[in-house]
Image (tube, coloured by chain):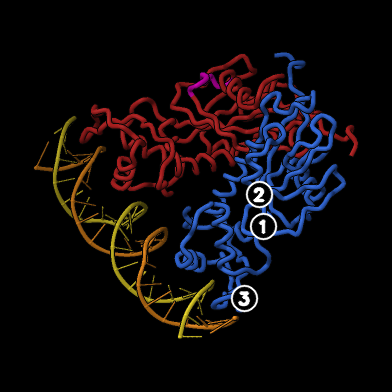
Chain colours: A red, B blue, C orange, D yellow
Amino acid sequence: MSTEDRLVAWVAADIVALTLRDGVLNVALVKRAAKAARGQWALPGGFLLQGESAEVAATRELEEEVGLGRGEVQLDQLGTYSTPNRDTEHVERVISIAYLALAANLPEATAGTDASAATWTPVGQAMTRPLACDHAQILEDGVERARARLEYSTVATSFLDGTFTMRELRAVYEAVWGTDLDPANFHRKVTGTAGFVEPTGEVRRGRGRPAALFRAGVAESLNPPLTR
Amino acid sequence: MSTEDRLVAWVAADIVALTLRDGVLNVALVKRAAKAARGQWALPGGFLLQGESAEVAATRELEEEVGLGRGEVQLDQLGTYSTPNRDTEHVERVISIAYLALAANLPEATAGTDASAATWTPVGQAMTRPLACDHAQILEDGVERARARLEYSTVATSFLDGTFTMRELRAVYEAVWGTDLDPANFHRKVTGTAGFVEPTGEVRRGRGRPAALFRAGVAESLNPPLTR
DNA sequence: AGAATAGTGTCTCTGAGACAATATCAA
DNA sequence: TTGATATTGTCTCAGAGACACTATTCT
């Protein structure tokens, strides 16, 4: 091989940002404004700048396009997509490093400096909608990764605000997994896992018996895992 | 941001190729021949060519540098390493897409068209040896991924030739995990998982009672998993 | 009181792990 | 026979899941 055959590529960081809105799993999507693909939906993301790592670029894009502040979200690298011609919008070769971000319920994605604003879209809808290049695949991989991470880690709490009831935490699992869970067994399992949640002592009143409030604990991994 | 700030990068595919030699986990390493880093050890790998996906490039490099034929190995994407200045050998920015490959016992890595030959090195040794750029990190991530994959998948059989005894399969787990497993429980667990292994009916004679021979079954995932 | 929601008790079943017991070979 | 290795039996314990039951509120 000669050096001229070497690929020189643009590198993008794209993010599957998930949140829960009204008990439904939503993903952040942006509307492309550039000439070729005007109006097409895509995952938020953009090109790495000089001196930027992929993770830094993903954090920046998340802030610019989705309005999520740095530090609010933890990023999880999903994988890299490098099929030739995956991006038909550019003549240059583009490879994309995908990240997963799980965010707490947010009022509305805010328009950033970039093109159009990001909007939260129910994952079910997003999956049936035509997305830019291979973003449908990336989204699918992201959702599957989110499902797997709920089993072995405590990330479910990052879908929720500071304090939450057991019912709300269970709703996260049910929305992401798309299954119903037994309230009794779920409660025992969660409270029986040291460091998953901490009781605040407060309660939240609703229709029936008041629900105890919890906040996220210090543990990060679940062992044994919560089974789907 | 202006278009000129965009990163233009070289993209490499690097492989953590693991095999078992005399019951010890080994990784393929190559000796760099290029001017700057002459003599330094590195993971096999190389730059993507025009029109090549990362997986194709990884397969090609595995064939060229380690002598593993296409189709003999299944590749598993580990992650992408994109820290600026991670590669001090080139002035261009280099990002690397890492893959994990598990191979059956092989006579010796063969020299390919590339520079020096790859040599199998015990993972313990490789970890203490200085490796090129961030390859020590990639190796560590690869070994950890291999450990995790043994739990949930049947890949352990790809470390072995066509037929093997239960003892040999158990040795794979023990070498990769670095723990001892109970022969009785391991035997029951493996034979009790449909599709993991199939008895050939043959036996292999050794010091004591002959051991039944098995071949890999059709299953790919283990459920419930084998616990470390 | 009655409806609604939160949380506990209890039973069963599966599977992991410890370890004893048996099987089948070579020397 | 003895020693070595392979395989099966058996017991115990932890945890998942089903589901009945109790607790605490609102209307």
The residue sitting at 79% across, 26% down in the picture is: B90
Tag 1: residue type? Arg
Q: Chain ID for label 2?
A: B
Q: Earlier in the sequence, mark 2 or mark 1?
A: 1
Dot label at residue B21: 1
Residue B170, quarter of the rendered image: bottom right
The residue sitting at 36% across, 47% down in the picture is: A181
Tag 3: residue type? Arg
Report if residue B30 is visible in the image: yes
Q: Chain ID for label 3?
A: B
Instruction: Please name whichever residue, A7 or A172, is drawn nearer the observer in this view of the structure.
Output: A7
Say if labels 2 and 3 share a chain.
yes
Report if residue A121 is visible in the image: no
Q: Chain ID for label 1?
A: B
Q: Secondary structure at mark 2?
A: strand
Dot label at residue B204: 3
Label pair 2/1, CB-CB below 8 angstroms: yes
Q: Earlier in the sequence, mark 3 or mark 1?
A: 1
Total numbered labels: 3
Q: Is A48 left, or right, of B112 in this rendering?
A: left
Q: Main secondary structure of the magenta part?
A: loop
How dense is the environment of label 2, judged by Cα within 10 Å: few (below 14), some, or many (20 and up)?
some
Q: Which residue is the site of mark 2?
A: B122
Q: CA distance from mark 3 to mark 1?
A: 20 Å
Residue A76, position as x, y percentages in the image: 55, 33
Residue B104 in the image: above or below residue B211? above
Residue B5, position as x, y percentages in the image: 74, 16
Q: Secondary structure at mark 3?
A: strand
